[in-house]
Image (cartoon, grey):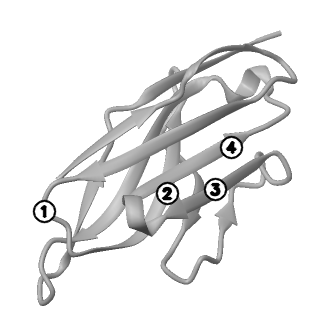
Amino acid sequence: VQLQASGGGLVQAGGSLRLSCAASGSIYSINAMAWYRQAPGKQRELVASIPNNGITNYADSVKGRFTISRDNGKNAVYLQMNNLKPEDTAVYYCNMEVKRRRLASTSNYWGQGTLVTVSS
């Protein structure tokens, strides 16, 4: 299973970006999908998550500005980021809990990361 993330870039404060992440390979189902980020010198942190039931969860720092969504038919997760701030600058990683066969347990997979830079 491979996760391919895209959509990062350089944007001015107040701007918007949309991140995408698609999984490929042998996939039976995907449970939770999430986005994490890691800023220079800081630990990786959870930005937003969306389990199978669609109930979203956000870090306090992005509530009201970011929206996570998923497309199960495409094995994809998205992160719409609005009103970006310089403190949102980080490498963003997608994460998925994938079940490769019907009776298998889930395994955790990570995308390669996409850099988001917000200038002031």
Q: Estimate how packed mark 4 is, as few (under 14), some (14 to 19) or many (20 or more) residues with alpha carbons within 10 Å.
A: some
Q: Which residue is mark 1?
A: 26
Q: Residue at x 49, y 57 (%)?
A: 34
Q: Estimate how packed mark 2 is, as few (under 14), some (14 to 19) or many (20 or more) residues with alpha carbons within 10 Å.
A: many
Q: Are marks 3 and 2 in contact (CB under 8 Å)?
A: yes
Q: Are marks 4 and 3 in contact (CB under 8 Å)?
A: yes
Q: Which residue is mark 2?
A: 34
- Identify the secondary structure beneath mark 2: strand
Q: Residue at x 80, y 26 (%)?
A: 85
Which one is earlier in the sequence, the residue at label 4 or at label 2? 2
> Which numbered disc, 4 or 2, marks the residue closer to the eye?
4
Label 2 sits on what residue type? Ala
- Mark 4 to mark 2: distance in Å? 13 Å
Q: Residue at x 42, y 44 (%)?
A: 21
Frontmost residue, 71 versus 19: 71
Is residue 102 toward the left or the right of residue 71 in the image?
left
**Residue 53 at what x, y percent from top left?**
55, 83
Q: Which residue is mark 4?
A: 80
Label 3 sits on what residue type? Ile
- Mark 3 to mark 2: distance in Å? 8 Å
Q: Estimate how packed mark 1 is, as few (under 14), some (14 to 19) or many (20 or more) residues with alpha carbons within 10 Å.
A: few
Q: Which mark is residue 68?
A: 3
